[in-house]
Image (spheres, rainbow, N blue to C red):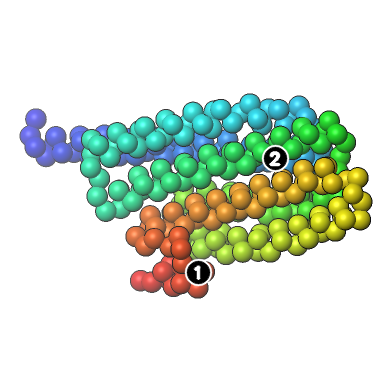
Amino acid sequence: MNSDNSSGHISQRFDDELDAVKSQLTEMGGIVEKQVSDAIASLLDADALLAEKVVKKDKSINTLEVSIDEDCALILARRQPAARDLRLVLSIIKTTTDLERIGDEADKMATQAINLAEEGKAPHGYVEIRHIGQHVSKMLSQALDCFVRQDVELALRVAQEDKAVDLEYGTALRAMMTYMIEDPRSITRVMSIMWSLRALERIGDHARNIAEHVIYLVKGDDVRHLGLKKMAEKVHET
């Protein structure tokens, strides 16, 4: 076998390994999206059985995280990738971590749904859960989409949406505090709603993180600690 053929085979195996971890990441993303959707539904419908399924499914997310991390570590050790390939592997590792943490937040919401199914639905907060839930679910879907497509413009829009979610979360918390003051008997149940709203806000943060990983992958700029204006400048740099 000549050196050109050998290099070609090595390059093909490397591409296959990258495709395999990207496929695993896509699978993990789909599971996490479903977890978030089911966790929200279990809250809105006081569905303890659905909530329990969300809690049990968290183990499969953790298993995928470990598998992807191990595969990425092997790629780094064997292939010693550089430039964009290195950024791709690092971005996959970081995105996997964010997806695992989103799964944890879905688990927290499902736990609150189980509590509310046992104690009785809270008197307030379900409109806020539905609204913010729809918002962060869309952010998560778009974040995963922009990773697959390596679309920095969409990534920027996801990052910008996180600010709107933060504002909605702040407004919802103030409303929940008012409800508890007006009806102290509802405090325990409304607190379950507040913890769920907090979990949704954190999911929005992790969706933004994924978007930032995409910008790093494509542009080579670490934008994690930049404001939205500077982030937009990096995205639009030629």
Q: Position of residue 31 (x, y in %)?
A: 58, 35
Q: Secondary structure at mark 1?
A: loop
Please identify the quadrant where the C terminus is shown: bottom left
Specify whether 232 is left or right of 55: left
Q: Which residue is mark 2?
A: 109
27, 87: nearer the viewer: 87
- On the question of residue 120 being in view, the answer is yes
Label 1 crowd bin: few (<14), some (14–19), many (20+), radius 10 Å: few
**Residue drawn at (47%, 42%) of the image:** 97
Q: Earlier in the sequence, mark 1 or mark 2?
A: 2
18, 229: nearer the viewer: 229
Label 2 crowd bin: few (<14), some (14–19), many (20+), radius 10 Å: many
Which corner quadrant of the image does residue 59 belong to?
A: top right
Specify whether 237 is left or right of 63: left
Q: Secondary structure at mark 2?
A: helix
Q: Is residue 214 above or below residue 120?
A: below
The amino acid pointed to by label 1 is Gly
- On the question of residue 41 being in view, the answer is no
Specify whether 85 is left or right of 135: left
The amino acid pointed to by label 2 is Met
Q: Is residue 149 above or below residue 41?
A: below
Spatial CA span between label 1 and label 2: 29 Å
Q: Which residue is mark 1?
A: 227
Q: Position of residue 112 (x, y in %)?
A: 74, 38
**Residue drawn at (75%, 62%) of the image:** 171
**Residue drawn at (66%, 47%) of the image:** 199
